[in-house]
Each structure stands twice: as structure tokens, then as C-alpha cells.
Amino acid sequence: MRKNIVAGNWKMNTTVPEGIELAKAVVARSAEVPAEVKLIVATPFTHLYPVAEVVKGTVVGLSAENCADHAKGAYTGEVSADMLVSAGCEYTILGHSERRQYYGETDEKLVEKTKLALGAGLKVILCVGENLDEREAGKHFDVCEAQIKNVLYNFTAEDMKSIIVAYEPVWAIGTGKTATSEQAEEIHAFIRKVVADKFGAQVADDLTILYGGSCKPSNAKELFAQPDIDGGLIGGASLKADDFIAIALAF
Ligand code: 13P
């Protein structure tokens, strides 16, 4: 059965003490959220260990925002999947458009990262989505299809149990411009079909697909009401615990 998930991607925001306070505020209000909705916070690497202490024994899960494409060794500045697990992480985001755009993250690298993350026991939140030019050229289906195939088709149906997909149209990220619920739903349903083509209907039906891109308390209800939208990956609005919880309450 697929899960409803509301995950906050803090990106490169908050100092460590601010992050601890934010995590505490999310935990403090988490009891209001129905048990069927999983809450996750994805924090910068520096915050993971102290935030793990805050969320330990609560319903709030902990995610990283990235991990290395090598297991260990001489890769200065990188953080491995095993390190994330040792810091208390259960999840990692991979392939966020900001990493694809600013840090040269390719689908090939994402295959390696996903293998290492799954091998370490992490669940992966894989991001896909088209940019504005691609949307305007009518290529949004092709772009998402290629991103899904290039990465996920290298894995097994068993691996898919540990994978969550986030559809994040780049033109909607941090712009205040949300995809309409129809625009989001048609891509989510399409992603599920691309997954079904390789892994079968059951795996596709069990896959959690999150929407990300200017999701906020005022539009979450309509988005989450769509049959193929199973929750959200929230940027800006996850930096205020009240907004983050209000989004989770939209289910
Ligand atoms: P915003 O919610 O700030 O648009 O960011 C979405 C996002 O990129 C989440 O990963």
C-alpha cells in the first residue's frame, strides 16, 4: 500500500541551533497529524545528527538532501550513504533539480547514488521534473519519462519498495507558481504508468509520488485530493513548523 508523505526539504537554510528548534516545533505539533500521513524533515548534513536526537522515538522521519556517488575514501567534501545512516537518517533526497542544475548531477550519477543509498539501507526520494523551456515546448512528459527510465529502470521491483518519487516542475520551485492540480495529476499518473510498464501494476500502485513546487497550506488540499498525488515535498513552507503541519493536515 502506498503511503501519504509530507516531507520538508530545508535546502541550505537554518543554522544548526535554528534547525534543532524547527525540528522540535515540528515534533511538538506532529501528534495533530493523522497516523496515515508520514512526516519527514530533510536537513543539511551538519544538522542531521542533532536533529536525529530530536526526532528519535517520534513519528517524524529524518532525511538527507543528497549523498555521495562513492562508498568511501578520498572524496573531499562528500558524505557517504553509510555516514548518513550512522547519523540517524532513514531517507535521502536524490536528484533534486537544484543539484542537477547547479552541481552537474546526471542520471548516471543518480544510478550510483541510488545503489549506494539503498545498499546502506536508506529509502530514496528521487526527484524528477521539467524546466520552463521544456514545459513550454511540450516536452514535460518526455523529460520525466527519461529521468524515471534512466534511473529507476536499473533497479528491481524489490528495490522499488524503498523508493519514493517526487515530481517537482522546476518552474514551480520557489517561484510561488504552483502547477495546477490537473497539471500535477496528469504527470503523476503518467509517472505511475512508466513505472508500471517496467515493474507491473502492483509496484506502480504501491509507489508514493510526491508533488513539490510552491506547495503551501492554501493549495495542498486540492493537490492532495488528486488520486495519484500521495503527498508533498515542501521547500519554503517547511521552514515554518505551523505551515508544514498545516500542509500535512490538508489530507
Ligand atoms: P518550494 O516549496 O520552495 O517551491 O520548493 C520545492 C522544492 O524544491 C522541494 O524540494
Image (tube, rainbow, N blue to C red):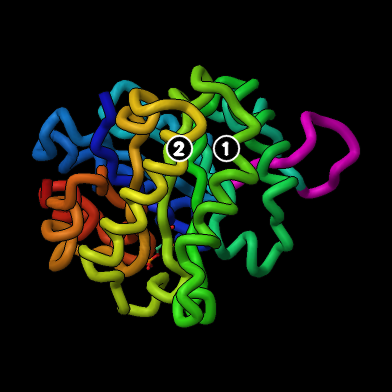
Q: Is residue 54 left or right of residue 163?
A: left
Q: On screen, 109 above or below 2?
A: below
Q: Tag 1: residue type? A: Leu
Range shown magenta:
66-77
User: Measuring 13% from the left and 51% from the top, which residue is drawn there?
Assistant: 225
Q: Secondary structure at mark 1?
A: helix
- Image quarter where ligand 1 lies: bottom left
The image quadrant where one finds the N terminus is: top left
Q: On screen, 30 above or below 214?
A: above
Pointer 2: what residue?
195
Q: Picture quarter containing residue 167? A: bottom left
Q: Residue 251, position in %: x, y?
A: 12, 46
Q: On screen, 218 above or below 32?
A: below
Q: Residue 240, position in %: x, y?
A: 27, 60
Q: Picture quarter containing residue 97? A: bottom right
Q: Picture quarter containing residue 161? A: top left
Contact, mark 1 vs mark 2 (Cβ under 8 Å): yes
Q: Is residue 186 one of those drawn in magenta? A: no
Q: Residue 171, position in %: x, y?
A: 43, 76
Q: Tag 2: residue type? A: Val
**Which circle marks residue 152 in the picture?**
1
